[in-house]
Amino acid sequence: MKKLIAIALLFVGMTSFAQEKISKENRKAQRAEIEQLTPEQRNQLRLKELTLKLDLNASQQKEMAKIIAEQTTKREALKADMKSAKESNKKLTADERFVMKNKMLDEKIAMKERVKKILTPEQVEKWEKMKDDKKNHFKKGMKKHQGKKMEKK
């Protein structure tokens, strides 16, 4: 009986080590295979999420849809610029980084003003809290990721 249990444990142990290891390149390929949502689909989902969380009415939904669409196009353009800069191994100078950061903050201020005109004060408060929660969640994930990098070194 003991031999049978030992053989079973040995068999289970050997099969668990036989599992295929997934490399970073393999993971990236798997992610690329998954069909990505179109920008319009992402915009619709984001709008519905905001509608549920902020209880938007029809006119607020129309205005927020415009804002979300604008944000998406700006984000896609920035992503393309960053990708081309990365491929050409171009490093930004301190002045270029300052200009970029300044522009981004100006756009955030303008966005906040537009949203405040559309939403009620209670909705703005919820919206701010949602943004803060998302930011904190992202930071927590980054700290966790950074900790794993430190352990590997």
Image (cartoon, rainbow, N blue to C red):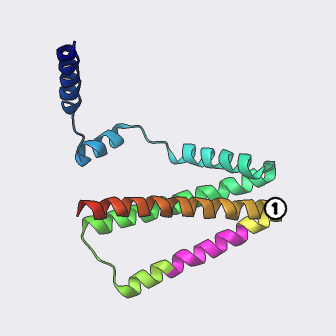
| Front-lying residue, 85 or 112 | 112
Q: Residue at x 37, y 66 (%)?
A: 82
The residue beneath circle 1 is 122
Would residue 48 be found to the left or right of residue 33 on screen?
right
Residue 51 lies, in percent from the top left, at 73, 48
Q: Amino acid at mark 1?
A: Glu
At 56% from the left edge and 43% from the top edge, which residue is drawn? 41
The quarter in which the N terminus is drawn is: top left
User: Magenta residues, as a range?
Assistant: 102-114
Q: Work out which quarter of the rendered image holds the C terminus and state it.
A: bottom left
What is the x, y in percent for residue 6?
19, 21
Q: Which residue is more in the foreground, 106 or 2?
A: 2
Q: Residue at x 55, y 46 (%)?
A: 42
Can you name the residue that lies furthest to the front here?
Answer: 2
Res 120 visible = no
Where is residue 32, by image quadrant? top left
As helix, strand or loop, the secondary structure at mark 1 comes to helix
Secondary structure predominantly adopted by residues drawn in magenta: helix
Q: Is residue 81 visible?
A: yes
Residue 68 locus on image (x, y percent): 62, 56
Label 1, residues with CA under 10 Å away: few <14, some 14-19, many ≥20: few
